[in-house]
Amino acid sequence: MVSLRFKIMGIVLFLLVLLGLWITMQMRATLNTSLGNQLEKQGISLGRDVAARSTDYIFTNNLFALHELIQDTVRNNEDVRYVFILDQKGEVVVHTFKQGMPEGLRTVNRVNNSDRYQVKILETEEGLIYDIAVPIFDGRAGVARVGLSEKSIREIVIATTRSLMLSTMIVSMIGVLAAYALTALLTAPVNEMVQVTRAVAQGNLNKQVRVWWAKDEIGQLAQAFNSMIISLQKSRQETEDFSRQVVKRNQELAAYNTIAAIVGQSLNLKVILSEVLAKILETTQLSFGKVFVLSPEGEKMAPIVQQGEQANLNFFKEPMLGEGIVELVANQGEPVIIPDLSEVPQFALNMDGQAGGFSLAVVPLKSKTRVVGVMLLFGSEGLSGNEANMQLLTTFGRQIGVAIENATLWEELKAKEELRTKLLEKVISAQEEERKRIARELHDQTSQSLTSLKLGLKLISEACTLEEVKERVDELRTVTNGILEDLHDLALELRPSVLDDLGLEAALQRYTKDWSKKFSIEVDLHCSGLVNFRLPPQVETTVYRVVQETLTNAARYARATAVSIIVERRDNSLVTIIEDDGVGFEVQRVRRSPLEAKKLGIFGMEERVSLIDGSFAIESEPGAGTTVYVKVPLEGMVINHD
């Protein structure tokens, strides 16, 4: 007969080996896919770089520069197998093959002028080659072709596989040793229980099973077995105890009503728990109680209130409570009652042999099925672990759990209300700042220009000759044009009419053109998927304002020389990417800094995007420019076709 120990060891070894092989296969597949995608992205990036840099050389017929360009690309990227450039007719202009251009390679990967790139995987004697074709100047200057080898991917996958197999062997050995130790620990108490069972079968009811090994299922079985023996010994006393149990149940019912009344009177958590705990101690005739509540982070149980005398509780150390029985009950969600602590060696040892007669009950506090706290009760009155006591403590735990949940929800509601108030204050402050800015614009520019216009009109009235009048009129015409431009810019910042009339793409083109001219900063705007489509007004307004705010920051703080904007409709979402080549900044430092102007801009963009259920992210480092990402889901929104 195969023993239980060897059965468990065999199962553990089989599962560990099977798991190791499965993880290895999954890791190989994941690495192949991930590294293949990474190699493809690298090839696309190199292809685009070669296509962009070779445009001028092709138009100027500078073959030497083209040759140096592709040779540098091969030298600087170890994964690149070859690079060559085709003209508009498909003829090879330059290539990096030392033995000549392979036959058929020129036509194996064709790309349309409307495509951004074309990727084709070629099977060669050297393995797989990722061939990327990128149109040069929208195909009008030819095509750049880049080939990347997957040799580095194979080396990484092989090395990773060897490492995983070695790890599987080591873990299997450790698992077998752990299984051997675990089975030795489990079979020892089982053997002892077999001996006690044989003694009980022979009529010896004085012998009981020791429960020193653990508070696990076997320990609970031993406790139940011991309770059965005690129950047999005390069966004659059941009739006498019945009357006392009736009185006790009446007291418990009265306690239920009292606790329910306390819970309904207040939402102050500490007040509720203090009064309820005092009533429970009175009902159970225990001397000390302590309530632990789950922290807001949901990581640990923290003590919040306690009641009664704790002179006899000195043997309980706080780490023991936090890491031991309190956490055990919180995780299992079931109450634990230890009628006699002297039967648990670690408790009896800490009490210097005075644990006899003391009971301990640890009860989970539940709201529905979720444990929100734990109640610890201790006293010298014998508290048995029978079903009635379990039900009593469980009912108390549910009542307290509901009270904790209600108080927590009330606190969360208050916190959300405070947050809403602060948010409203920020919105009002932003409105006031915008009004101040408009007032400054009108005062500093428009008002001064109107004053100049007024003075010019006065000078016209004082002119003596027709030539002088014409000269003054020309000056006033220039001043008037400036006033109109200032008012046009101010109106455009407040609400561009082209956004309502022609849509997001036309509005962005108009705004970026004017902004680029005003600040002498190059703007590259690329919109995709917006032709013949009108997005919902709230989406168009949000994206327009985010672009507007980002460009404003680029002009004020970034000292950028170029800005790239991509607005693209992808499936059921609108993606916006705004990138500048400015000085950059530390995002987290600015968020925590007292610079309200910068913080308000970022905060305003985040709030706008969140109101339409979008996601907002900003990436920047000093000296590395700034990139803003906005993604707005369009699923469920009404999109109009022009």
Image: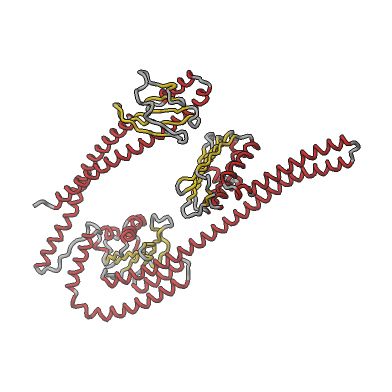
Q: Who's the residue at 82% across and 44% down the image?
A: 454
The answer to whether 467 appears left or right of 179 in the picture is right
Q: Is residue 246 above or below residue 116?
A: below
Return the x and y of residue 421 as percentages of the image width and height: 57, 58
Considering only vertical position in the picture, is 507 above or below 107? below
Residue 141 in view: yes
Check the image and report above or below for 358 versus 145. Answer: below
**Along the viewing direction, whichever of 191 and 153 lies nearer the viewer:** 153
Q: Where residue 517 sits: x, y (%)?
A: 64, 36
| Viewer can see residue 629 | no
In the drawing, does residue 127 fall left or right of residue 272?
left
In front: 61, or 247? 61
- Which residue is more in the foreground, 131 or 265? 131
Is 526 on the left or on the right of 330, as rendered? right
Query: Which of 239 and 555 lies nearest the eye of the viewer?
Result: 555
Q: Position of residue 185 (x, y in %)?
A: 19, 53
